[in-house]
Image (tube, rainbow, N blue to C red):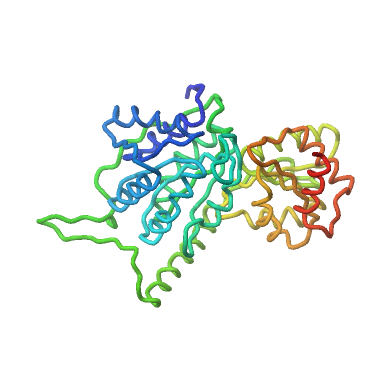
């Protein structure tokens, strides 16, 4: 198929449409506004539903209602908007219905700025809303990967009747790349047998998120646990680069992982045995891949565009088998390949203390650099 030049936000919107999206509800927030604007004309053009809500609260509750009706539905937002959606995401989970959210991350906390960041990791990966639940969270590193994942995430969310999150940042949302778009699927006819229905001449089907009885609530939570185990069996995703002979592994997700790959390639040209492990599924996390990498290499360098949110998940799974270091940039600052390459050299020179927490040594290094 023909490759076309697309901006990231427009591309994931078109991919969702081609995946059979039936309804989109959203509210403007930078840096994902182009997706909302694209949906505003493209969805009506195809006879599908688009509605700009009065707020993120309104948007996610419209998503909730459409999801209960068995409609293939999504929204997109950025950090502050995702924060407003958290309560309803928990209710969607409690109702056992599928929905899709694309979060184009920006810097925070608070209002922050419109620069790209990865500081929504904890918010999205570890639940965010109240209660025991885990959405599926996939983090692409390019526009093509974003297109492919968005195209697939609806089927995944519907398979497990859960929330599917695509976690990208402002870099991917705003940059342009040549991509191959997937084929257009027809919107489905009819509705799933679990969807709500009711009329004068038919039996009612009701969905609920209310579990007042503790034993009943525990039974539902055990259902979520079993579902989670099934997801972990089938949906863990990651990519490895140059890990066959690596003595040091760099670990990064999304755009930070992509930038780190450039640094790794530069280090390999100098003869350094460096590899890269890039988690794609952040939830479920690639536990075994991290554990195996830690058993193979002596050093691990975690690279993120935050203060070390994925770092905690990496540390849990290394079991002390490798010395773990950290390098991050915050507030919307994008790390450069040269910075990561220099950090690789610093770690190899053992300028970090193995007995010190990676965040501590990183903070001391950043303060001295400033």
User: Furthest residue to the left?
Assistant: 201
* Residue located at (48% from left, 66% from top): 225
* Residue located at (38% from left, 34% from top): 17
Is 52 left or right of 247, judged from the image as shown?
Answer: left
Residue 220 location, x and y as percent?
40, 69
Is 243 left or right of 165, judged from the image as shown?
Answer: right
Is 251 left or right of 118, judged from the image as shown?
Answer: right
Query: Closest to the observer: 240 or 65?
Result: 65
Residue 304 location, x and y as percent?
67, 44
Residue 249 location, x and y as percent?
76, 47
Say if 88 sits above or below 1 in the image: below
Is 97 left or right of 175, judged from the image as shown?
Answer: left
**Quarter occupied by the C terminus:** top right
Residue 244 location, x and y as percent?
75, 45
Query: Closest to the observer: 348 or 191?
Result: 348
Q: Residue 366 falls in which quadrant of the image? A: top right
Query: Closest to the observer: 137 or 351?
Result: 351
Q: How many marks?
A: 0
């Amino acid at each position: 198929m023909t490759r076309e030049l697309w901006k990231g936000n427009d591309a994931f919107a078109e991919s969702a449409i081609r995946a059979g999206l039936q309804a989109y509800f959203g509210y403007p927030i930078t840096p994902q506004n182009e997706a909302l604007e694209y949906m505003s004309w493209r969805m009506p053009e195809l006879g599908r539903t688009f509605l700009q809500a009065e707020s993120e609260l309104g948007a996610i509750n419209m998503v909730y209602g459409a999801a209960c009706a068995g409609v293939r539905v999504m929204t997109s937002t950025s950090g502050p908007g995702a924060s407003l959606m958290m309560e309803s995401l928990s209710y969607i989970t409690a109702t056992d219905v599928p929905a899709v959210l694309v979060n184009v991350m920006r810097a925070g906390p608070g209002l922050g700025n419109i620069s790209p960041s990865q500081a929504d990791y904890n918010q999205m990966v570890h639940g965010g809303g109240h209660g025991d639940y885990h959405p599926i969270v996939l983090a692409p590193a390019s526009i093509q990967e974003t297109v492919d994942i968005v195209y697939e995430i609806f089927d995944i969310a519907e398979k497990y009747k859960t929330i599917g999150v695509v976690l990208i940042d402002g870099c991917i949302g705003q940059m342009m790349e040549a991509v191959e778009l997937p084929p257009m699927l027809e919107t489905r006819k009819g509705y799933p047998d679990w969807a709500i229905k009711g009329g004068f001449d038919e039996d009612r089907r009701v969905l609920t998120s209310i579990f007042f009885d503790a034993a009943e609530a525990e039974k539902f939570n055990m259902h979520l646990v079993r579902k989670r185990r099934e997801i972990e069996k089938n949906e863990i995703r990651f990519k490895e680069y140059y890990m066959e002979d690596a003595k040091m592994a760099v670990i990064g997700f999304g755009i930070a992982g992509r930038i780190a790959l450039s640094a790794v390639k530069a280090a390999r040209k100098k003869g350094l045995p460096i590899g890269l492990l890039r988690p794609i599924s952040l939830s479920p996390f690639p536990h075994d891949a991290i554990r195996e990498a830690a058993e193979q290499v002596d050093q691990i360098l975690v690279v993120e565009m935050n203060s070390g949110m994925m770092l905690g998940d990496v540390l849990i799974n290394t079991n002390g088998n490798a010395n773990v270091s950290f390098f991050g940039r915050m507030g919307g600052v994008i790390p450069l390949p040269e910075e990561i390459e220099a950090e690789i050299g610093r770690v190899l020179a053992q300028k970090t203390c193995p007995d010190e927490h990676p965040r501590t040594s990183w903070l001391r290094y950043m303060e001295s650099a400033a």
